[in-house]
Amino acid sequence: MNRRRFLAGIGGGVSVLGGYAGVRLADIRPYDPASPTGETPRERIVAAARHRYAADHRAVTQVRITHDSNGAAGYDAATYREYHEHSRRRHTHVFTTRRRPAEHVPNPFHGLFGYFHWGTADRDRLPKTSVVHVTDGEIRSSWDAPTPEAGDAPNPPELGDDGISAPNSEPRSGMNGEFVLPHQTEWAERDDGGYEVTAPDGYAEVVTLPASVDGLRDGCRVLVRLDADGRLSRIVDDRVVTVESADDNGTTARTVGYRIVTEFDQYGTATAPRPTGDVETTLQNRLASAGTDLSVY
């Protein structure tokens, strides 16, 4: 091989690698997930729950306290919005605590972020909103973001004064955990096309319960609706639990009821918008983010 051809080959290789790196850093990839299928209601619902992890979508969860034997009930407690853009490996989470009960109520959300936000939000400074944007290489987050209107979150969400940026490894599929667990229980098909589980033992198979829940009571129910393509459309989780607490007078028990409603939409079109706002970052974080973007492919 002569020198000219050798240098041309090296140049072509660099161009290819440079183009590949540019595509990877831009996070561009083909994406066309198949619709979920199944023979039985259980198979269809489990397939739809798994499909959610592979499909771009938005999930909006509203939590309402419907009953509390030790205090007022019938109020909206929290809203959680997940913008899941799997095709570009991005997730944006907007969590708003609107009201906290006077006494401890088990966290209805899964994941460390939801746990801390639900348990530490100052009752005197509600509503309180946090935003976390997760990519392959970076996390941008704020624990004091502006609270969106009740109907929807702004696009993109805003960072507050305490915004931070940090390097990140490969992102998880979402901070809210499994909406429907893999299970063996059977679903009853309703006349209106939905599917439900009402027995406490079957309910316990389907949902993820926080560790602080000591017992399920009568009234627990999960209702699932699928859209025309077999994807999750709506989940209504009616949860009635026993909560035990100890003080100087001994251990007391109370019952708490939730209605946790999650609606899924924007399949195939949802985006995980990068939050706006000034965030201090470092050259080390930028390099670490770029390195992670490249290494995970």
Image (spheres, rainbow, N blue to C red):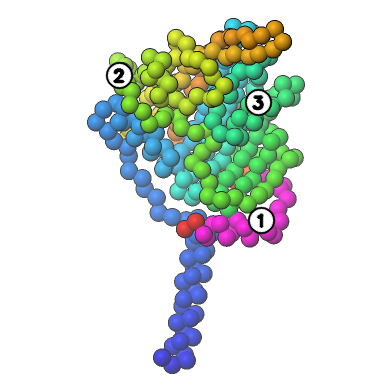
**Secondary structure found at label 2:** strand
Q: Pointer 1 and pointer 2: residues touching (CB < 8 Å)?
A: no
Tell me if mark 1 has few (under 14), some (14-19) or many (20+) residues whose alpha carbon lies within 10 angstroms of its own. some
Residue 147 image-quadrant placement = top right
Towards the viewer: 273 or 25: 25
Q: Is residue 209 above or below residue 250?
A: below
In the rendered image, which residue does mark 1 sit on? 285
User: Residue at position x 69%, y 36% from top?
Assistant: 143
Q: Secondary structure at mark 1?
A: helix
Question: Is residue 289 inside the magenta stretch?
Answer: yes
Residue drawn at point x = 69 percent, y = 12 percent: 247
**In the displayed structure image, the side of residue 231 where residue 239 appears, left or right:** right
Give SS at disc 3.
helix
Q: Magenta-highlighted stretch: main secondary structure? A: helix
Q: Which residue is mark 2?
A: 189
Amino acid identity at mark 2: Glu
Amino acid residing under circle 1: Asn
> Which quadrant holds the N terminus?
bottom left
N-terminal-most mark, 1 or 3: 3
Mark 2 or mark 1, which is nearer the start of the sequence?
A: 2
Front position among marks 1 and 2: 1
Range covered by the magenta-colored residues: 276-295
**Residue 161 percent across, percent down from the top left:** 75, 40
Identity, as a three-letter code, of the amino acid under mark 3: Gly
Q: Where residue 54 appears, x then y in whole percent?
A: 41, 43
- Residue drawn at x 56%, y 57% as measured from the top left: 292
Is 18 above or below relative to 295?
A: below
- CA gap between label 1 and label 2 equals 51 Å
Image coords of residue 214 (percent x, y): 53, 17
Q: CA distance from mark 1 to mark 3?
A: 30 Å
Residue located beneath label 3 in the image = 119
